[in-house]
Image (cartoon, rainbow, N blue to C red):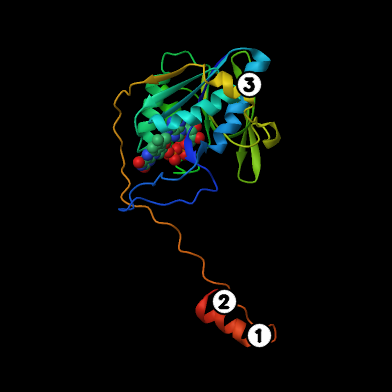
Amino acid sequence: MKILVCISHVPDTTAKIQFTANGAALDPAGVQFVINPYDEFGLTKALQLKESQGGTVTVVTYGDASVEATLRKALAIGADDAVRLDGVPTDALQVASELATYADGQGYDLIICGQESIDYNGGIVPGALAAKLDVPFVNACIGLEISGSNATLLREMDGGKEELTATLPMVIGGKKGLVEESELRIPNMRGIMTARTKPLAVTALAGAAATTSALSFAKPAPKAAVQLIDASNLDELVRRLHEEAKVI
Ligand SMILES: Cc1cc2nc3c(=O)[nH]c(=O)nc-3n(C[C@H](O)[C@H](O)[C@H](O)COP(=O)(O)OP(=O)(O)OC[C@H]3O[C@@H](n4cnc5c(N)ncnc54)[C@H](O)[C@@H]3O)c2cc1C
């Protein structure tokens, strides 16, 4: 089975986020970048499928040279080869178009994306990619079994689960449940060493234009200081909840 895992290169969840002076872009200075956590679940599932059924796992990221450390980590975890679509993406449909142009005709049986990126949180790329490739798509995927060219999938719904079938090739948007956190793989020394010699191809873009452009980003307002009210002063508590917090 030929599997493609789309990897989004995102700030570590513990990173302190700052924006550029005009507020229109993330300031990457001093930020540690990681594999999008949803994509780690997808990568692990891809490696498990390869181990049980044979095949190859390719990872792809649309980004500039700064994303190569993230791709090398995916190679150290076990992917066979990596592809970097060379450019700076600014829009989810642009990313989906470039991924589709790259994947079209390469014969991938399964394309695994994350449900969403944890930076821009668009949740657009996987569905748009499937639409551009004209293949089935299941998002919020928490279970996947493959038998021949048939897939049985479990999808998380509000308050429940849905079981579906589809025929390969297809795209999924995965999340925790596809594999469990305990199954995620940490690169070992041997993996890190072999990753250095695994192929990382840099491919020119097809030139898809962005359809949106960010004007500005704003952080949530800082939390107000905690107010302590004497336990015996119930009237004051009610007054502040009513007049200041306006919740009663
Ligand atoms: C180096 C770099 C620089 C960037 N600079 C900017 C910028 O200046 N302004 C700006 O607005 N945005 C920027 N981006 C973000 C880029 O626009 C997003 O990748 C894109 O908009 C998709 O975001 P999303 O939240 O809609 O993805 P979602 O649809 O939420 O992502 C879901 C899944 O799609 C896949 N995916 C998403 N993005 C990529 C990708 N780039 N390559 C491969 N797979 C992907 C992953 O599997 C991911 O889990 C940058 C990204 C990178 C990697």
**In the rendered view, would you say 159 is above or below 191?**
below
Residue named by callout 2: 248
Q: Nearer the viewer, mark 3 or mark 2?
A: 3
Q: Quadrant of ligand 1?
A: top left
Q: Which numbered disc, 3 or 2, marks the residue that appears first in the sequence?
A: 3
Q: Residue placed at 34% from the left, 30% from the top?
A: 87
Q: Is residue 152 visible?
A: no
* Residue 108 image offset from top left, x and y in percent: 50, 16
Instruction: Report how far apart the C-alphas of labels 3 and 1 lie in the structure.
Output: 63 Å
Callout 3: 10 Å neighbours few (<14), some, many (20+)? few
Of badges 1 and 2, nearer the viewer stands 1
Q: Which residue is mark 3?
A: 190
Q: Position of residue 222 (x, y in %)?
A: 48, 64
Q: Which residue is mark 1?
A: 234
Q: Residue 94, located in which quarter of the rendered image?
A: top left
C-alpha gap between disc 3 and disc 2? 60 Å
Please give the name of the residue rendered at 36% of the width and 38% of the height, measured from the top-left corner: 91
In three-dimensional space, the C-alpha distance between marks 1 and 2, rounded to whole angstroms, equals: 14 Å
Asked if disc 2 is less than 8 Å from ligand 1, the answer is no
Residue 127, given in percent of the width and then of the height, sits at 46, 32
Residue at image position (55%, 21%) is: 195
Ligand 1 is within 8 Å of the C-beta of the residue at disc 3: no
Q: Label 3 sits on what residue type?
A: Arg
Residue 153 in sight in this render: yes
Judge left or right: residue 184 versus residue 29: right
SS of the residue at dot 2?
loop
